Each structure stands twice: as structure tokens, then as C-alpha cells.
Amino acid sequence: MVSWSALGRSFGNNLFKTKTVIPNSVQNVKFSIGKSLCGDHGHKTMAMQPSRFQYHKFKDMLHYYFMIGLIPVGAIIFYTNVFIGPAQLTPIPDDYNPKHWEYHRHPITRFIARYIHNNPQQEYEKFLHFIDEEAQKMKLRQLEKDIVKKMAERQDYQAYYYRPMLNKYLRLNKQTGDEMLNRIGDDYKD
Amino acid sequence: MVAEGGAPDDNLFRAFINAVYNTVDAPVTWFRERVVEPNQKKYPWYHRQFRRVPTIDQCYSDDVVCDFEATAQFKRDRMVDSEILNIIRMRFEDCMLYEAPDHITKCKPLWERYKDAEEAWFIKYGDLGAYGDARKAYMKQKHRMIWERRHGPLSEQTK
């Protein structure tokens, strides 16, 4: 009984089938970007497949960071640790003043402290000088403020109207005035 | 824990555990002792010695340089005192780990000593805030002394 309906099913299936030959090219696409003379026996096809860009980019970046970063830096670190090695802690000899990089243990830290950074004691003393100078400026400005306040309070000193006369600005003003006069033409005399 | 010399250790379990440990440790130790250490150069490094500078109570009030140096010294002293407190606390904690259930009675002297040290640290450095400098600590001491003058001693540590 099953076989009779199977016969009917195969009859219906044969009606659906189309007798077409599937060509060799993938998904019926053939790309030809110009006809180049190359021995590729007729046809070059580009396969339509999901993008492998991220994979290739990852490989690129991995190789880049390995070659430029890890290998040279690793070699430097290996060399310093094996052939130079960290320092031994010793008490400071009586007559010797150690340089500022000799206060570090690892050779790379010593290198950075010696050639890149400044002497910490020098930086400290520079900062002390800086804050001392700023403090002096603060004191001067505070004194000026106090004087002006007292003059305003007591109203007994004429100097609070005093504006310092600087000849430089007077000369500039005169020069500007003369030039404006020239341009406008007010200096025309018959 | 390990017998120095004496009878050879023929404990199988210990031998097995040592063998497992040595699968990682032996090559590393060999490399260090044969390759690394002969090639390393020997040269010294030092610990920085800081001179004592005038403290904040010896500075004029408008002398910013003296104030800055006193604050730097104060911060260094605070670091040193914190480490001292750490050592005292570690002593108590080691005792506690070793004595485990009866640490309350056995480690009492160490606990007392730690508590006193902690209280002294807090009296000097505590509650100064994130920007605590030498001047704030000095004022804190002044306020404490005034309070003590009015109310009597604060604690055992300040007598």
C-alpha cells in the first residue's frame, strides 16, 4: 500500500524536477575583470563567501605587535636581567655622595632615572625656590592691597588718583592721532 | 620542619610531592644557577637618607619653604610610623595564626601593645583628612592639649 502511494509521490516529484545542468561556477556568478592573458585555462571566478577581513586584520596586528613590540622589548628585558642583573643593597660609604640613579635597584629603572628623569633633589629645590618667589609676590600684592584699602579708608592721601605716566603710551597716542589726522585730511591748509 | 642531615627521608608521599614540585622548579632553578647568576654583574644601590629639617613648630608662620619641607618630613614620618604599626600588627596576627583557638589569652600582651600603638598613631596622624599637612597636625595637637587642660588626660598614651 505504501509502495502505490510512493509511486504516485515519485510521479508528482518528477513533475517538479527541472532538467537543468548545474554549471561549474559558484552560484551562477562569473566575474571577469578584463580579459587578461594568463594560463588559467579559461575562467577565473571570485568566490562569494563571508568576509575574512577581521581574521586577516587580526593576524596583521598580531604579527605587528609581536615583531615591533614583544620581541625587541623582550630581548632587552632578558639581556638586562640575565647579563646585568639587579643591584645589591649596600650601606652608603662615609665619604661618598651617591648619584641620584644609584638609589634604584633594577638596571632599566636606573637607566631611566639617569638619562630621562631629572635629579629628584634638584626638582625639589627648584620647587622650593618657585614657591618662595610666589610667596614674595603674594606678599607684595597683599601689601599694595592693604595700602590702597587704607588710603580709601582714611581719605588722607592724594595718590589714589595718581595714574603713572608712561611716555611710551603718550608717544603711541600722538603717533596714532597724527596718522588719523592725515587720513581724514583735517590738516589741510589752504 | 625539615630535618637537617640525620636519617635520610624515605617518606614516599613527600618524595612524590617533591617530584611534582620539581617538574616546574628544577629547570627554573637550574637556569638561574647556571646561566643567570654567573653572568650578572655586582654593583651597589643605596637607600636614600633624608636629613632632619626644622619641624613646623620651629618655622615662621609666613615661611612657605619651611612649611613645605616640614610637611614633606611629616609625610615621611607618617609613612615610617604606618610601617611600624604594620609590623606590630603582623606580630599579633602571626601569634594569632599560630595559637589559633586560644589566641585571646595567649596573644594578649601583643594585642595590648598593638592597641596602644594604634591609639598613639591615631592621636598623632588620624582624622587629618586627605590634605593633612604638618600645620594641621600641629593645630590638632594644640586643640588636644587645650582639651586636656580643661578636661584632664585624654588617654594613657598622652600622659
Image (cartoon, coloured by chain):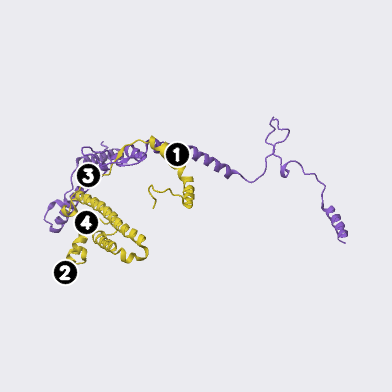
Chain colours: A purple, B yellow
Can you identify the residue that label 4 sits on? Answer: B135
Spatial separation of the CA atoms under disc 3 and disc 1 = 42 Å
Q: Answer few, some or many: residues within 10 Å of disc 4's Cα (few below 14, many 20 plus, some between 14 and 19).
A: some
Spatial separation of the CA atoms under disc 4 and disc 3 = 20 Å
> Which residue: 23% across, 59% down?
B124
Can you identify the residue that label 2 sits on? Answer: B150
Q: Check the residue under mark 4 and report the chain it is in.
A: B
Residue B113 in the image: state x and y as whole percent. 26, 61
Q: Check the residue under mark 3 and report the chain it is in.
A: A
State whether discs 3 and 1 lie on one chain. Answer: yes
> Which residue: 22% across, 58% down?
B137
Residue A22 in the image: state x and y as whole percent. 77, 44
Q: Of the two numbered discs 4 and 2 on the same chain, state the one appearing first in sequence.
A: 4
- As drawn, which residue projects farthest toward the front? B7
For label 1, the SS is helix
Can you identify the residue that label 1 sits on? Answer: A74
Q: Check the residue under mark 1 and report the chain it is in.
A: A
* Three-letter code for the amino acid on which mark 2 is drawn: Arg
Q: Check the residue under mark 2 and report the chain it is in.
A: B
Q: Are marks 3 and 1 in contact (CB under 8 Å)?
A: no
* Three-letter code for the amino acid on which mark 1 is drawn: Gly
Can you identify the residue that label 3 sits on? Answer: A129
